[in-house]
Image (spheres, helix red, strand yellow):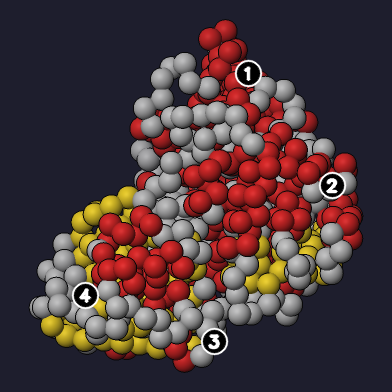
Amino acid sequence: MCGIAGLIRFDGGPIASELTAMSELIAHRGPDQASIWSTEGHGHTVGLAHRRLSIRDLSENGRQPLASHSGRSMLVYNGELYNETALIHDLQKASDFQMRSRCDSEVLLAAVEQFGPSYIDRFNGIFAFALYDRETGETILARDPIGIKPLYIWKSRSGSAIAFASEVKAFLGIPAFGRAIDTVSLSTFLTQGYVGPSRSLMQDVTSLAPGQVLRISPAGQISNIGTLAPRWFSDSIHAFDPDELKAQFEAAVMRQRVSDVPLAVWQSGGIDSSLVNAACSTPRPRSLIFASDVGDFDESSDASLVAAHLKSEAVVASFHDDEEPAETFSSVVWHMDGELADSSALAVKKLSAATKPHATVVLSGDGADELFGGYATYGATRLASRLAPFIPQAPSQWMARQLLAKNNTASMRYPAMELAGRFLHGLPLGPHAHAEWRRYGMPWDLRDIASSEMRDVIDDGARAYYAAIDTGRGRSSSADPASWGQDADLSYYLPGDMLMKVDRMSMAHGLEVRVPFLDIEFIKYTSHIAGSLRLPNGKRTKPVLRDLAVSYALPAAITERQKTGFNVPLAHRLRTDYRSVIIDLLVREDYVSPYLNPNAVRRLVSEHLSGKTNRAYLLWTLMTFAQWRRHLER
């Protein structure tokens, strides 16, 4: 896994120093090699930069930017292809292609040059890449259909330059890059804790959407030339053969084990990571386990049980009060580019740091909950859809606000007042309640803290996007409401939050994370499983995966365990070891103006720290924004 960057200038200006600065800002993504290539022609100057994390063919053959066999194309690539054997077969049928290395980058480059960008749809893997065609002067940018690997693009307002990179912070190396905040994206960020998989918090920056393929013309026009979005659910749905499901899953895990460096499994106490671990053939990889010092958040006992059952060597990473919380928080926000306020990034950061001495590649269970219906909100959405016509919105909202104001618990994972308040808040919205239950900032709190500049854009952007996904998929009014939330999570929440968090925190430590549940071939197979099996009525979530776990003879404590999530005790942390950080960022200093009212923000801080109420999610989001503003000022 690697970091990539590129810069195209149309005004004749030099690019070497700016490209070097961009590369340095993402050096953590590729600690093993760094290279830059540039050329002039077609009315512009273009340069590509690459930071390599060596995984396959550790020799110099894997160095990038990589030239094609013909010399026509240059590539910078961040990712991994799992079906390269099939791609090589296609290439050899069409030409005299012969491998010069054992790197999948060579295969990807040859395939796009030989067959064109439409062939990218054949790739099974995780990737973001830029390919420059020296004959035409065109640049192709592409991102994998799940959105596992990131790629951002910036175009100067004058039209004199275009840049692209794995992370937004790379653009800080360009003097012409404006550091202004996009207020619409900020509104969405405050609402849901992230900006979404195709946007950025910064003005003039967007993210390639999952599966998007862009062409940059020699004159700088940017056009969308393809979408590789997966078909999550097939029109032809049916029952399935459990043995075939098991074989398909094991094949996906086997494909993703390919590596020339040590590999491990992130083992929680849940079903998903346990299945990944169980499906690994010998030699059994190490199990990296996360342990919390707050009882309700600790899964290490169950995780260790799985590792012992599978005879996998266990390594436990303990999460405890940070000795340097300000430094830790600053690092997390820096690596997230200030665009994600998911506090579980703290846990992923610690787990990544603990993993690196033992492995450079790790397998994760991410994606299983979204694909197989692991969240309780799916069933709750069905209930909301039935009850919504009988629930008046104003009284329900009033009651929700009262309950949430009374929630002051700091040590429980799911406080009763929190659950009840959030349920009542979303209940009148019926099938769109799911988006409201994912809120970080409640609407009344956002209205209270918004400045006059922000009031016009403080809206229900998160819910509106989820609704757009529903209508965009052409669902009928009779479609299962739970499947609406599931589709939105797969297309929006998963790449916008979960996968982004894992990518940034793992790459901050030179670690590659792979996700077998999101293997394209596995998704194609599972898309035919009937929705009634994926999202059955009743309390037993993920029955397909639970039955699969039973087939591996995993302990009953695991196969029947309820979903808990990879959380940290955020409310507790803010009142203890992170107390000084929140006071520094949101009380002593003002990094939220002119977008938010600093005095209103301070009132929220006071209410939380005094124990009057729990506003941890929103406060962590505000802290993230403030810390990013501090980074931008440096």
| Quadrant of the image occupied by residue 369 | top right
Residue 526 seen anywhere in this rendered image of the structure: yes
Q: Which residue is mark 4?
A: 133
Q: Please tell me which of labels 4 and 1 falls first in the chain.
A: 4
Q: Nearer the viewer, residue 473 or 609?
A: 473
Rendering coords of residue 574 (x, y %): 73, 55
Q: Amino acid at mark 1?
A: Leu
Against 72, residue 546 (above or below) is above
Residue located at (41% from left, 20% from top): 476
Q: Which residue is mark 3?
A: 58
Q: Please tell me which of labels 3 and 2 falls first in the chain.
A: 3
Distance of label 3 from label 1 (alpha carbons): 54 Å
Residue 195 seen anywhere in this rendered image of the structure: no
Residue located at (63% from left, 43% from top): 244
Are dots 2 and 4 in contact, CB under 8 Å? no
- Disc nearest the viewer among 2 and 4: 2
Q: Nearer the viewer, residue 626 or 353?
A: 353
